[in-house]
Every structure is written in structure tokens, then in C-alpha cells.
Image (tube, helix red, strand yellow):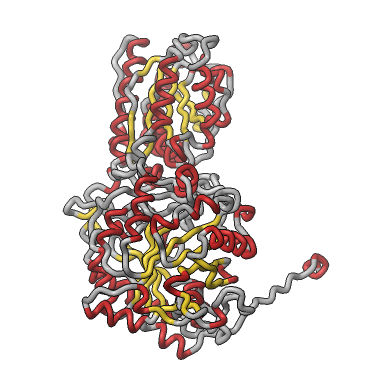
């Protein structure tokens, strides 16, 4: 007789039982136990797979751990970790014992004890390893180059490596995985499956990784079969997709930075393409257009941007309500563009026709939750639809401000008819192939255009039609600092940068250099910045202190990197002095920590500044089809906006508002 307990089967033998009866009973019990375990095993894989994917990692540390394989993940944003976890589940289902290892908790010198090593590695900033894998990668590099270590130190180790990267970074694509594989080979290890390379840019990372995983499992099964002298059945990745819903959510992990989505790691955070195969939504399969053209905005990107307040338009555009729009709706002041150029902030729409960018700037407001790329390779939406939808979504957000304390009825009514469009929301607007048609649509509605480009597409700048005001971001003045700050995708980024400034020089309408000052990065480069004046000969130079948006895996800036307004003023005055009278400090907006330099020969008339814009005149000039210049639509700058005015760039018709904060003392909280 037997009874089931939570942990075992207990056999109760009656002492008076005859030997023959006892043998028969034991035979029956053996058969029953076999049937029991067969029954239990029907559900074991599903439960085991779910547990492996969701439970915290537990590394084996017992005496036998070195006999098990080691599966390492080098991951910054959890994608390589997610992929490695999927492989670990597959290995477990195939009865191949592997420990799931975070390399930051592993002693690299123990590699000589390992017999099987599998590594899934992302490439991070400047082609370097993620933080959790830096020590392991450095150890491999130093050991491979040290003749004292020897070329056979890992002779008993067999390995396989998979890299997660982006071909947009041509020079550094999967350099970490390639380097790790090379160093393991130099130290005597034997590669059992050739290096796998996943490209997050192409959107097929899951398929490539699953195919590579199946080859790894097949190879390991072959090794086991050789050792045991028998053939081995293989469970492949496609067989486990249907058994469990893979959860790639960052919330599954304890990594505080897991919400950051970087393009090099972005594909692995999306649901498995196989798990969604055959499903359609709005005429799309797996987030891509049925006709095969890829959507720029993946579900992960969409969710991230929507969480930040963006309204996504179609497949690649967006609109967002600016805080200065909300501020001026309540009569509490406008942004620096109101002070410098006369924009009505409550009638300004912030939008972009391209959420993709060619840089990954350290001060990016969006922490790189938008995609990156060097060329347009996505589905393209119609410019008329983009403009109509942007205005519709913008006005809906304005209407939602009705009833908000302080919102003025007349400002709300005016806000429903936008007059300005800041094409600088996020991404690179001139990447959109139909940018000229989009600008035409805005101008046809007498909406002014303020377009910002990141100086990596000079040919696109040349072909642009007249813009109300065209900006080029000049985030650094030297090649090395530009690479460090903007982290561009292009290998010839400096040549593109210089050519973009030269292209700006040919424009007849208003042009601006936009400088973002980051203490410790570029605030000492006054001489180098001044050397760029002649390249683009801009009408204006905006100098703004960096806005602190929190540190993340993609940006380690702190409040120490944020300059004070006095620092920005000092830098601006020094830069103006370097221009030998060509530029002077014209305006400031203290609240935004921003200063404007203006070209004296154009915009200072009889001792007065004319930095503001006559918007009606601009639209009339555009409609005429005749050539015109920036001087044809300039307007007088009000006294309160001029540099040095006691208002500091704050419109006196607005009301300053300071929120009073009443913090209770510790005694009051305890009372």
C-alpha cells in the first residue's frame, strides 16, 4: 500500500506478509509509482518553464556546480538576460544542466574549471560591454594577451557565443560578442557553434536567436550522446513557444534601469514573433505592415512614449503638449522662444514627423526610448494625414485643459487654433522623406515652422524649402567631444557635421546654432565654438544649459553637469567677444537658463534689436513664391526681452507663479 505525500512516496509493509505476496506488492507499487511520475511529468515542463522565466536567479554553488554548464548574460537593459533565460529554459527541457549566471557575481579565474560555457552578450556604449560584464571581458582580454597565462588554460572548455547589437553602429556591431569569442579561442577553448549575431535594428532578433539556440542544444545533445553512447531527442525552441507565454516585461526583473529601452537591446523586449504568428491587428502582423514595410514605432516604443505623454501619429510621428503651452494658457509665462522670437506659447504645437534619430545624445530627454537609424527604411505616412492628425490631437489636449485651475478662457480659445509648430519634439524631422510637403501643409494653414536638425544630414538641409527658423544643434565644437556627447551612428559624423553647418550658410531665411552647455563636457570650449561661426554664418546662436532629466543606463549626467544661468551668461558673453563684434548678446530667458546671441549687422538697427518675427509677413512672403530673406520678416524686440532687462526675459503681461510648499516638521508628522 502507498500514499502520496507532498515530497515522496512512503511504503508501508505489513510484517506478517509472506515473501511471495510481498514481492507481488512491490511489483505493483513499482508500476504504480511509474504511472504516477508519468502523470506528473505531463505538467512538469510547463510549470518548470514558467518558474525558470519568472523566479529570481539562484546560482549553484555546491561542489558539483563546476560539472554543470554555465550560461552567462552580459546585459545592460535586460534583453540579453531575457534571451539567455529563454535558452536556459530550453536547455532544461532537454535535460542539459546549466547554471544561469550573472558575470558580475562570477570569478573569471574559475573558467579553467568549466567544461561548457554559453554567453549571450550585448554591445553597449562605444562598442564596450554592459556594466555587469565589464570585469569578465577585461579579464578575458588581459589573459589572452598575457603570455604567462598560456594558450591552453581553457583547453577543456567548449563554448558558444551570441551577440546582441545593431548594424546601425557599423564599426562596433557586436564587438563585445566577437571579442569574447576570439579571446576564448585564444585561451584554448573550443567553439561548438559558430558565433551568432542578432541585429535589433532589423527586428528579427527572436528568430535568429531561436535558430542559434536550437543549434546549441543540438550540438550539446550530440556531445552528451557521444559520452553516453546513445542518440538524444532534442526539444527545439519552436516546441516550447506554445507551452508558456514568455514574459519579457522589465517589471519581471529587479533592475531599476530595466525600463530604459536602447535600440541595441530593443528587439528582445518585444513579444516573441513566433508566439504572435498569424495574428493580425489593424491590418498588421507582428507590428509590421502586411505589405512588408516595417513600422518605426514598435509596441514597446509606443508604450514607452505614450507613458511620457506622447500622442503617436500613424507609424512614425508624434505630438505632445509642452509645459510652456500649459503655462501660458494660465497666463504664467511662455518659453524662451516667446521672449526671443515672439512665439505665442499657448498656440504652439510641438510635433515631429520622425521619431527616429541618428544620434544618442547623453542629455536626450527621452533616454533613447525612440528608435535610431541612419536612413529612412520604414513605412511612410502621408504628410497631409500627419498634419491633420497632429492638429486634431493637439487641440484635443488643449480642450482637456478646460477647467484646470488658472486656465484663461480667451487663451484656451486661442490655443485651439495653433499658429506655430516646433518640429523638435524628439528624433530627426528631416529624415522624413516628405518633409517639404509637410512644411507646405503647415504654411498653407499659416502655421510657422521652427525645425531642429542634428547636423548629420547635410544633403537634406540643402533641399529644405524655406522654414520660418532653421536650427542646427551644435552640441560640441571638436570631433572628440561631439562623439562623446552626441554618440552619433555615422562613422563620418564630423564631416557630416561640418557639411551641415556649411549647408546652413546657404539658407536665406533665419538660421540658428543651438548650443547645449553641459558642465564638465563642453563649457570650456569657447575658442573652438567661435571657430565654427564662419562655417554656418548663422543669424542667431542660442546657448542653453542642459536640462537634467535623471540619470539612466544611457546617461550618467547629474545635477553637477547642469550650469547656472550665471554660467550660461558668462559663456555667452565670452563667445560674443570672440566674434570680434559680429555677434552680441541680444536676449535672455532666465527661467530657461537660455541666452541669445544675434548678428549685429542684420538684427540690430539703430541700437535696437529686431529678433522677433512678423509671422503674418512671413506667410505672405511664402505664399508669394518670390525669394526673400530673414531681414524681410523681422520685428522689433520688446524692451523686457532684451539682455540685461530687469524682467530677465519674463513677459510683464504674464503673472509669475510660485507654488508654496508647506513641509511638516517631524514633530508634526508624529502628532
- x and y, in percent, of residue 494 in the image: 39, 45
Going 46% across and 40% down the picture, which residue do you hit? Answer: 125
Location of residue 419 with respect to 352 vertically, above or below: below
Q: Quadrant of the C terminus?
A: bottom right
Q: Look at the image and tell me whether residue 335 can be seen.
A: yes
Going 38% across and 36% down the picture, which residue do you hit? Answer: 164
Q: Look at the image and tell me whether residue 260 can be seen.
A: no
Q: Nearer the viewer, residue 401 or 438?
A: 438
* 145 sits to left or right of 91: right
Going 35% across and 54% down the picture, which residue do you hit? Answer: 500
* 358 sits to left or right of 520: left
- x and y, in percent, of residue 376 in the image: 26, 52
Quarter of the image for residue 23 reads: top left
- x and y, in percent, of residue 661 in the image: 69, 73
Location of residue 611 with respect to 55 vertically, above or below: below
Quarter of the image for residue 191 reads: top left
Amino acid at each position: 500500500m502507498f500514499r502520496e505525500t507532498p515530497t515522496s512516496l512512503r511504503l508501508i509493509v505489513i510484517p506478517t506478509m509472506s515473501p511471495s505476496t510481498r514481492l507481488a506488492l512491490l511489483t505493483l507499487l513499482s508500476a504504480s509509482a511509474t504511472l504516477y511520475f508519468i502523470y506528473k511529468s505531463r505538467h512538469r515542463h510547463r510549470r518548470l518553464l514558467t518558474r525558470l522565466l519568472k523566479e529570481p536567479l539562484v546560482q549553484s554553488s555546491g561542489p558539483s556546480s563546476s560539472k554543470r554548464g554555465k550560461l552567462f548574460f552580459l546585459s545592460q537593459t535586460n534583453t540579453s538576460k531575457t534571451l539567455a533565460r529563454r535558452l536556459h529554459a530550453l536547455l532544461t527541457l532537454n535535460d542539459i544542466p546549466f547554471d544561469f549566471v550573472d558575470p558580475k557575481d562570477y570569478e573569471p579565474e574559475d573558467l579553467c574549471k568549466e567544461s561548457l560555457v554559453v554567453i549571450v552578450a550585448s554591445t553597449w556604449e562605444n562598442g564596450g560591454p554592459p556594466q555587469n560584464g565589464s570585469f569578465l571581458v577585461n579579464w578575458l582580454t588581459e589573459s589572452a594577451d598575457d603570455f604567462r597565462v598560456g594558450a591552453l588554460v581553457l583547453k577543456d572548455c567548449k563554448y558558444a557565443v551570441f551577440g546582441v547589437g545593431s548594424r546601425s553602429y557599423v564599426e562596433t556591431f557586436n564587438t563585445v560578442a566577437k571579442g569574447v569569442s576570439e579571446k576564448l579561442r585564444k585561451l584554448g577553448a573550443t567553439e561548438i557553434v559558430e558565433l551568432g549575431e542578432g541585429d535589433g535594428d532589423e527586428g528579427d532578433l527572436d528568430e535568429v536567436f531561436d535558430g542559434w539556440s536550437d543549434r546549441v542544444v543540438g550540438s550539446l545533445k550530440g556531445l552528451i550522446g557521444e559520452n553516453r553512447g546513445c542518440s538524444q531527442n532534442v526539444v527545439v525552441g519552436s516546441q516550447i513557444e506554445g507551452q508558456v507565454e514568455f514574459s519579457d516585461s522589465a517589471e519581471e526583473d529587479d533592475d531599476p534601469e530595466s525600463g530604459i529601452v536602447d535600440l541595441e537591446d530593443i528587439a528582445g523586449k518585444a513579444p516573441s514573433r513566433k508566439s504572435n504568428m498569424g495574428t493580425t491587428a489593424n491590418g498588421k502582423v507582428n507590428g509590421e505592415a502586411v505589405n512588408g514595410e516595417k513600422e518605426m514605432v514598435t509596441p514597446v516604443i509606443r508604450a514607452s512614449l505614450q507613458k511620457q505623454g506622447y500622442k503617436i501619429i500613424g507609424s512614425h510621428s508624434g505630438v505632445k503638449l509642452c509645459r510652456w503651452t500649459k503655462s501660458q494658457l494660465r497666463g504664467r509665462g511662455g518659453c524662451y522662444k516667446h521672449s526671443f522670437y515672439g512665439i505665442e506659447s499657448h498656440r504652439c504645437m510641438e510635433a515631429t514627423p520622425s521619431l527616429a534619430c541618428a544620434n544618442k545624445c547623453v542629455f536626450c530627454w527621452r533616454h533613447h526610448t525612440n528608435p535610431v537609424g541612419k536612413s529612412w527604411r520604414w513605412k511612410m505616412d502621408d504628410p497631409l494625414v500627419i498634419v491633420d492628425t497632429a492638429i486634431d490631437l493637439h487641440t484635443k489636449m488643449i480642450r482637456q485643459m478646460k477647467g484646470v485651475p488658472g486656465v484663461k478662457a480667451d487663451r484656451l480659445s486661442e490655443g485651439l487654433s495653433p499658429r506655430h509648430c516646433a518640429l523638435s519634439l524628439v528624433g530627426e524631422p528631416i529624415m522624413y522623406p516628405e518633409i517639404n510637403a509637410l512644411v507646405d501643409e503647415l504654411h498653407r494653414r499659416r502655421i510657422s515652422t521652427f525645425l531642429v536638425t542634428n547636423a548629420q544630414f547635410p544633403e537634406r538641409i540643402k533641399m529644405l524649402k524655406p522654414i520660418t527658423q532653421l536650427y542646427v544643434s551644435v552640441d560640441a565644437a571638436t570631433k572628440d567631444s561631439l562623439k562623446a556627447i552626441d554618440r552619433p551612428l555615422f562613422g563620418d559624423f564630423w564631416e557630416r557635421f561640418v557639411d551641415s553647418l556649411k549647408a546652413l550658410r546657404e539658407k536665406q531665411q533665419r538660421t540658428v546654432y543651438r548650443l547645449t552647455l553641459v558642465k564638465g563636457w563642453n563649457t570650456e570650449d569657447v575658442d573652438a565654438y567661435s571657430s565654427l561661426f564662419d562655417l554656418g554664418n548663422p543669424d542667431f546662436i542660442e546657448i542653453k544649459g542642459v536640462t537634467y532629466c535623471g540619470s539612466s543606463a544611457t546617461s550618467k549626467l547629474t545635477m553637477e553637469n547642469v550650469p547656472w544661468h550665471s554660467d550660461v551668461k558668462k559663456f555667452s558673453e565670452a563667445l560674443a567677444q570672440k566674434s570680434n563684434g559680429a555677434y552680441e548678446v541680444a536676449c535672455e530667458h532666465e527661467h530657461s537658463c537660455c541666452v541669445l546671441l544675434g548678428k549685429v549687422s542684420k538684427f540690430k538697427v539703430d541700437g535696437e534689436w529686431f529678433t522677433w518675427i512678423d509671422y503674418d509677413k512671413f506667410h505672405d512672403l511664402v505664399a508669394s513664391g518670390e525669394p526673400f530673406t530673414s531681414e524681410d520678416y523681422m520685428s522689433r524686440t520688446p524692451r523686457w526681452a532684451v539682455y540685461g532687462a530687469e524682467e530677465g526675459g519674463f513677459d510683464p503681461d504674464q503673472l509669475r507663479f510660485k507654488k508654496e510648499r508647506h513641509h511638516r516638521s517631524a514633530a508634526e508628522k508624529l502628532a
